[in-house]
Amino acid sequence: MKKLFDRIKNKSRFNYKQYFKTNILFFTFVISSVINATMLRYLTVRNYFDFRPIIADLAIVLLIGAFGYFFKPKHQFKYFFSISILFTAVCVINSMYYTNYLSYASVSLLATSMQIVDVGDAIVENVMELKDFSYIWQIFVMYFVHVTLKSKSYYVEVTKTENGKKNFKGTILSGLIFALVFIVTLTATDIGRLGKQWNREYIVMRYGIYVYQINDIIGNLSPTINSMFGYDRNAKIFREYYEENPLEVTNNQYTDIFKGKNVIAIHAESIQQFTLGLSFNDKELTPTLNKLASEGIYFSNFYAQESVGTSSDSEFIFNTGLMPASSGTVAINYFDREYITIQKLLKNQGYYTFSMHGNNGTFWNRNLLHESFGYDNFYYHTKDYVIDETIGLGLSDKSFFLQSIPKIKTISESNKNFYGTLIMLTNHTPFSYIEPYSDYSVDLEIETVNPKTGKKKVEIKPYLEGTVLGNYLKSVHYADEAIGELIEGLDEEGILDNTVIIIYGDHDAKIKPSEYEYFYNYNPETGEMLDKNDPNYHEVDAYEYELNRKVPFIIWAKDQEFSTEVTEVMGMYDVLPTLGNMMGFHSEYSLGHDIFSVEENLVVFPEGNWLTNKMYYNSQRQEGLLLDLDIPVSVDYIEKNCEIAEEYISVSNAIITYDLIRKTKESSHLLKTYK
Ligand code: GP9
Ligand code: MN
């Protein structure tokens, strides 16, 4: 008996020193992978530290690392090194992605990434940051440790005592124990969010980047593998939502005011609302937009709600009143679904519908997407335009508009009514191409008087020239001039007499907060920057940055003076119902509201954040900002809006992924109405 005890005792006495000494490469791999994953969270969502995701990272790294023990020690390096490269790539890609989109990457975006190839310069100039590459150290450390170990005959020594099977089992067991400890800390909300996937920042912060990426891959495969199950659940979400929220049409002072009018919608690339009203050296930055805004109906609190599909998402939301897809983009992955669109609804009223764009037709898959929206014709690139002046991504806006006017004239002559979208291009990041085409100065001209001679002279004080924000503003000025020339040209052709002009900024310009801080805190007269500790220092925090992403939305008609500013918060998904009320069309599937009939509007963002006139709420971090300190909000108010936000995202995803409008139409009489 004593013998048996001794044997058990000896067996259980684990020699840790020996274990570490013979598994140096494995530990380098584990520690470096966990450090990188932690660094990613810290460098993206700044100053954020939580111990729980580290346990999840450790569990995943151990479980994956365990398989390295299937190899003989001298071959283990190849395994651990390959996985290190993969993990480093995951961190670099997600870091870059976060810098650009304030969210994390998804495999479903691989198809979309082809669009990024075309805007390559923009990525290099504005998007990449050195910190995005700071994860590469792992690869060097792994290699360095390997070379050192090799030179010390480590692998030869380890082979003598190696016990791969035992190490594999032990590592898997440790991985499972860490996984269990982590799972115990999860709440029902945490589990729900992992399944739904759209609150990406929350998932990465709670589960770590490795779990996030694995979950993302499984999530993207599962609808294909298990579509029947997904279909039933999503069809239920869809059915229940529209049963509880059927289309309600309320008449108001704007009902039918534009019935029978033509429409030209201008998709104004990257124009943000704050640019309206800016002036440099007593020259308005956007005189055309200012004029249209002051004469027409100006929605000054309007948000684009786009996701990673940027321009194409805006087009989709504008035309359908739905939210963008949570994984992938409608333009690339779900363009062939059936949607109820402004184009189709106006075609029911006999309108001819068209779109025009200077870039090539395959960008954002527009040649197929626009057909799916129901445009009768898409005029684009060399098919319909002479590329006689190129700025940045392609045909300059001024040339594009100039060439579009005669086409619109022809359309107006051969159709009773038309609805057309003109997609602008020049004001696209990185904005630096505008320099030779702009005489608008964003430096300051300061007049000084010589006290002795009394002579006046104008001194130019450096300010925004040469900065990204400065180039952007110059580029916006160019876009504004181009819109002015278009309107003049349309007027000369008599097209404005029965035509409503709509202008919407398609999304923000993705300019970094530091650029705005320079703009606010640099004094060109003294040449000094305010100190960060100065009470007057204007810091652009995450809330201000988010809220400043709003874009202008203007409805203007030549002979109708509205001079109305709408300050209620409004989303791109409210356009279809609002314009529909003015023109006599309605979609029972739009999630937005007619802004003139809604009591308190709610703008939902693709990541689940939301905005009302009272509050901006960040669902990722579960914290909000009161917009009027005199109007407090209750917990109920916040919970209710979070619920609605989640509902809008789920319903949109159900429609987009499972083609539910087509399926509903196929089983109802509506088929006849819309086809
Ligand atoms: C190009 C354009 C740009 O055709 O619409 O797309 P974006 O990069 O803004 O999504
Ligand atoms: Mn765009």
Image (cartoon, rainbow, N blue to C red):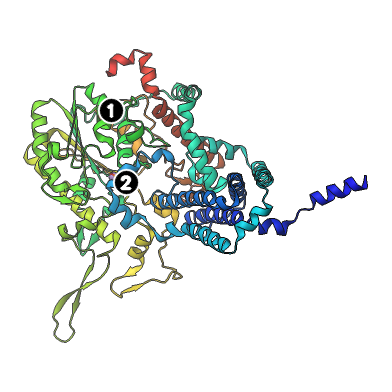
Determine whether the residue tagged by mark 1 lies in a helix, strand or loop. Answer: helix
Q: Is residue 81 left or right of residue 586?
A: right
Q: Nearer the viewer, residue 560 or 137?
A: 137
Determine whether the residue tagged by mark 2 lies in a helix, strand or loop. Answer: helix
The residue indicated by pointer 1 is: 372
Q: Quadrant of the image for the N terminus?
A: top right
Q: Quadrant of the image for the C terminus?
A: top left
- Give the residue type that dot 1 points to: Ser
Marks 1 and 2 close (CB-CB < 8 Å): no
Q: Is residue 111 left or right of residue 473?
A: right
**Residue 601 appearing in the image:** no
Specify few, some or many for label 2: CA neighbours under 10 Å numbering under 14, 14-19, or 20 or more: few
- 551 w.r.t. 537: above or below: above
State how far apart marks 1 and 2 are (Cα): 23 Å
* Residue found 40% across the figure and 27% down from its top: 655
Residue 482 at x, y percent in the picture? 16, 48
The residue indicated by pointer 2 is: 116
- Give the residue type that dot 2 points to: Ile
* Residue found 12% across the figure and 26% down from its top: 415
| Residue 366 sits in quarter | top left
The response on whether ligand 1 sits within 8 Å of label 1 is no
- 253 w.r.t. 38: above or below: above
- 538 w.r.t. 494: above or below: below
Of pointers 1 and 2, the one earlier in the residue sequence: 2
* Residue found 48% across the figure and 43% down from its top: 200
